């Protein structure tokens, strides 16, 4: 059944792309075999501490030492600001944002064409208690957002990070 309340949808796959890239770099696992969902929301200016990569849901990320995972958590949460700082406030991650927009558009259009495409997005949902908008995986279909996926299993640390 379509989620007609999902008229406002945010593009959040850039966080997932970054998390996957960081895990790939740390583990040498081929990037196409890395799938770290990033859930949460946006309380900071570009990303922020409410975006939580779920390393426990990816086999290669799960095997990383805790110290490396902690560094990557910070990198995922600060990545947008790092780019702005590196460009001395005169830009942002334009190509990365364009890639995220293209992925999102592909998911929406593939769904509208009758396919079924799963992509992370910020949607109005009750998937996480007490939070009105939350980024999680959604399935796009002919009617728009067909399904908002549950967050799934989280480590106790990830659960704590999701508490607002």
Image (cartoon, rainbow, N blue to C red):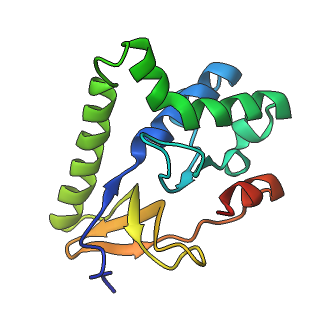
Determine which quarter of the picture holds residue 72. top right
Asked if residue 111 is positioned above or below residue 38 in the image, the reply reads below
Q: Is residue 117 left or right of residue 62?
A: left
Relative depth, front residue between 26 and 53: 53
Residue 20, can we see it? no
**Spot occupied by residue 78 in the image (x, y as percentages of width and height):** 55, 32
Asked if residue 93 is positioned above or below residue 133 in the image, the reply reads above
Number of on-image labels: 0
Task: Give the residue at x 17% y 57%.
Answer: 109
**Spot occupied by residue 131 in the image (x, y as percentages of width and height):** 53, 72
Q: Is residue 110 left or right of residue 128?
A: left
Asked if residue 51 is positioned above or below residue 93 in the image, the reply reads below
Determine which quarter of the picture holds residue 151. bottom right
- Name the image quarter holding the C terminus: bottom right
**Spot occupied by residue 127 in the image (x, y as percentages of width and height):** 54, 75
Relative depth, front residue between 18 and 107: 18
Task: Give the residue at x 74% y 60%.
Answer: 159
Asked if residue 135 is positioned above or below residue 65 in the image, the reply reads below
Residue 127, can we see it? yes
Determine which quarter of the picture holds residue 145. bottom left
**Spot occupied by residue 61 in the image (x, y as percentages of width and height):** 71, 37
Instruction: Looking at this view, name the residue that lies furthest to the bottom.
Output: 1
Task: Give the residue at x 31% y 65%.
Answer: 116
Q: Is residue 142 left or right of residue 129?
A: left
- Name the image quarter holding the N terminus: bottom left
């Amino acid at each position: 059944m379509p989620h007609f309340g999902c008229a406002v949808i945010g593009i959040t796959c850039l966080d997932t792309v970054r998390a996957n890239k960081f895990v790939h770099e740390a583990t040498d696992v081929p990037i196409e075999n890395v799938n770290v969902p990033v859930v949460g929301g946006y309380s900071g200016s570009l990303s922020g501490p409410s975006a939580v990569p779920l390393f426990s849901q990816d086999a290669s990320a799960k095997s990383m030492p805790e110290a490396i995972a902690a560094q990557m958590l910070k990198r995922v949460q600060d990545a947008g600001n790092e780019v702005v700082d590196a460009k001395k406030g005169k830009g942002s991650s334009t190509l990365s944002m364009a890639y995220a927009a293209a992925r999102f558009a592909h998911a929406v259009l593939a769904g509208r064409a009758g396919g079924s495409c799963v992509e992370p997005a910020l949607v109005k949902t009750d998937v996480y208690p007490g939070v009105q908008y939350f980024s999680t995986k959604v399935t796009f279909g002919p009617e728009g957002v067909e399904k908002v996926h549950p967050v799934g299993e989280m480590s106790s640390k990830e659960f704590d990070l999701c508490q607002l």
